[in-house]
Image (spheres, rainbow, N blue to C red):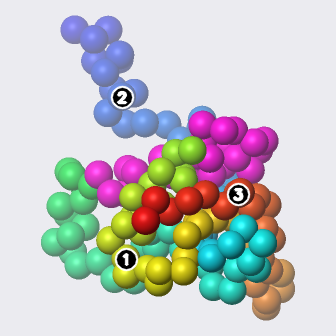
Amino acid sequence: MLKTCALILPALIPSWRFFQTVEASPRVEWTLLATARETPSKWHPLRPCPETVTPLQMLARLFWNPARNDALYITSCAERIALGLCPHSVGEITTRILRDITTLPIHSCTKLMQFRLVFVAHNGTELTRETVFLSTPVATLR
């Protein structure tokens, strides 16, 4: 019985020592374009976190939170892209953005979608933004 408890206890109370370093994660931003040569003017964050969460929502999220799990998967894909181009991760992020923008009212001249990965860091009192990846534009399928 003691041996069984020793095996189960680490699963119930995880150790955070598996993190080698704690660093900033890249933010995923997307834009819509009319042509591939167009310079993007406005970038939108992909699935931004809500500004406020009620205590009841927090409690419910402890047991059921598929949206946050998917957001963590997107972050994991973005980190893999930032470390070195990973076509699978690019495809996963592209698929999710295209799925999300199907519900948005899009102007008929916008035929392409592009995303980028941005690291935001504090530099003294200023925020600096560094783009580490820019995807190739893909058709929005509209």
Relative to residue 62, is residue 81 depicted above or below? Answer: above
In the picture of the structure, the residue carrying the numbered disc 1 is 104
Q: Secondary structure at mark 2?
A: helix
Q: Residue at x 76, y 79 (%)?
A: 39
Q: Amino acid at mark 3?
A: Ser
- Earlier-in-chain disc, 3 versus 2: 2
Q: Which residue is mark 3?
A: 135
Report the quarter where the C terminus lies.
bottom left
Q: Is residue 15 visible?
A: yes
Q: Residue at x 62, y 47 (%)?
A: 90
Judged left or right of residue 129, residue 95 is: left
Q: Residue at x 74, y 50 (%)?
A: 82
Q: Give the percent coordinates (x, y) of residue 21.
A: 71, 47
Between 10 and 58, the one lying in front of the other is: 58
Residue 50 drawn at (x, y percent):
38, 77
Q: Would you say 24 lies left or right of 100 here?
A: right
CA gap between label 2 and label 1 equals 41 Å
In space, the residues marked 3 and 1 are separated at their CA atoms by 21 Å
Name the residue type under label 2. Ala
The answer to which quarter of the image holds residue 114 is bottom right
Regarding mark 1 in the picture, which secondary structure is present there?
loop
Dominant secondary structure, magenta: helix
Which label belongs to residue 11? 2
Q: Residue furthest bottom?
A: 125
Which comes sooner in the sequence, label 2 or label 1?
2
> In the image, which residues are magenta?
66-90
